[in-house]
Amino acid sequence: MSIRRGSSRSHRALRPARGDEWDVTPTAFGRAGDATARIPGGRVSIPGAIPGEVVRVRAMAQRKGVVHAQVLEILDPSPDRVTPPCAEVARGCGACQWQHLALDAQRAEKRIRIAHALGVEDSDLDDTVTLAATAFRTTLDAAVDRGRAGLRRYRSHRTVPIEGCLVAHPLLAELITDADYGEATEVLLRCGARTGERMAAPLPAGASIRVPDDVVRDRIHEEAAGRTWRISADSFAQASPEAMDALVDAVLRAGGEVPIRRALDLYSGVGLFAGALADRGWSVTAVEGAPSAAADARHNLRDLEVAVVEDDVTAWRAEPAELVVADPSRAGLGPDGAAVVDATGATRVVLVSCDAHALARDTAHLRGLGFEVTRATPLDPFPHTPHVEVVSVLDR
């Protein structure tokens, strides 16, 4: 590392200060998806770089011992580098931070993360379930700037008004470019790709907005896994109905190997997995802490043998079951959630994880309770980002 700008400091003794420039070869992707490299006294985080290539960077800030740097020039590009397919990247949008990385390389890196989290080899994982890389996303959390929808700059609160979005479903295009969100500060845009319904839910909720007549504020319906699902504005939704189908397929494959009796769907959301299992003869209890999602689940599953419990999973008194499906938030089960799983007496757990570090922690907790990972299926519903999705099967 050679620091530029005429610094008189020993370039190996001290870490760079703001404004210093130097050439560096990142060695890995960090947890958040930025390329990283070791430097004297710590490390540097370099969004927009790829491990193995040589880049010229400028130090922009230091936080918690990490120097955050900006790429000035690609001196020796990685063979995995591509031109970002979305024009909004050049205008500053930071929503899809891996657009400079080829899709195959993105998926390979995600498999490495999942395998490392589980303590297995890449070859031990099932084939990755790949999904559409463009025009798929049916939910978009947009910022609002002077009435226009936009997205944030990477690691910034600044809003970038956008003219389009590579990953947004076409039903959202008009709501991104032509609608007026008045004094709102944010707006949740959502559509039902298979029903044609559209929603724009502003914050604050009472903000006056101008949108097409068919656009509602409260909920949409989507079709997936053979059923129609009501999804309210405050309820979580998967990235696309294709992602819903793929996740259900993976869960049912695991459930199909267990004699049909009792199942629990923990962190059940609007009831996707509970409904799929009940449709195939399981007696299911679904536990969900968010009032909106629990209400949606009761509506969606009203014709099935499913008991919907509105409660925090970690406060809920566990019931006996042979199968547990758990789809926690990015934070994972944690030790308290794992203890609830253990208390059910289940012999099989299907864990749906959206964060590799949480996956590592959760499988460690469950292994300590006698479970072992017997299968893991990676899915890629979030192309152009470092986000992972994996369905792990654990047995005891």
Image (spheres, rainbow, N blue to C red):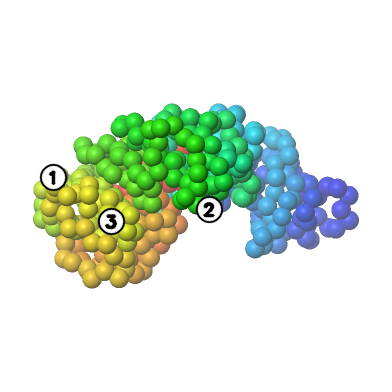
Which amino acid type is marked by label 2?
Answer: Arg
Secondary structure category for the residue under label 2: loop
* Mark closer to the chain start, 3 or 2: 2
Q: CA distance from mark 3 to mark 1?
A: 21 Å
Which amino acid type is marked by label 1?
Answer: Arg
Image-based side of 208 in relation to 313, left or right? right
Tell me the residue that label 1 is attached to.
280
Q: Which quadrant holds residue 338?
A: bottom left
Secondary structure category for the residue under label 3: helix
Which amino acid type is marked by label 3?
Answer: Ala
* Mark closer to the chain start, 1 or 2: 2
* Residue 386 in view, yes or no: no
Q: Give the quarter of the figure containing the C terminus.
A: bottom left
Number of marks = 3
* Mark closer to the chain start, 3 or 1: 1
Q: Which quadrant holds residue 51?
A: top right
Of 242 and 206, the residue lying toward us: 206
Q: CA distance from mark 1 to mark 2?
A: 38 Å
Image-based side of 60 in relation to 5, left or right? left
Tell me the residue that label 2 is attached to.
31
Residue drawn at the location 46% of the way across and 51% of the way down: 205
Residue drawn at the location 16% of the way across and 62% of the way down: 321
Residue drawn at the location 36% of the way across and 62% of the way down: 333
- Nearest to viewer (mark 3 / mark 1): 3
Q: Which quadrant holds residue 330?
A: bottom left
Residue drawn at the location 22% of the way across and 47% of the way down: 300
Q: In the drawing, what numbered circle is on residue 294?
A: 3
Q: In the drawing, what numbered circle is on residue 208?
A: none
Q: CA distance from mark 3 to mark 2?
A: 32 Å
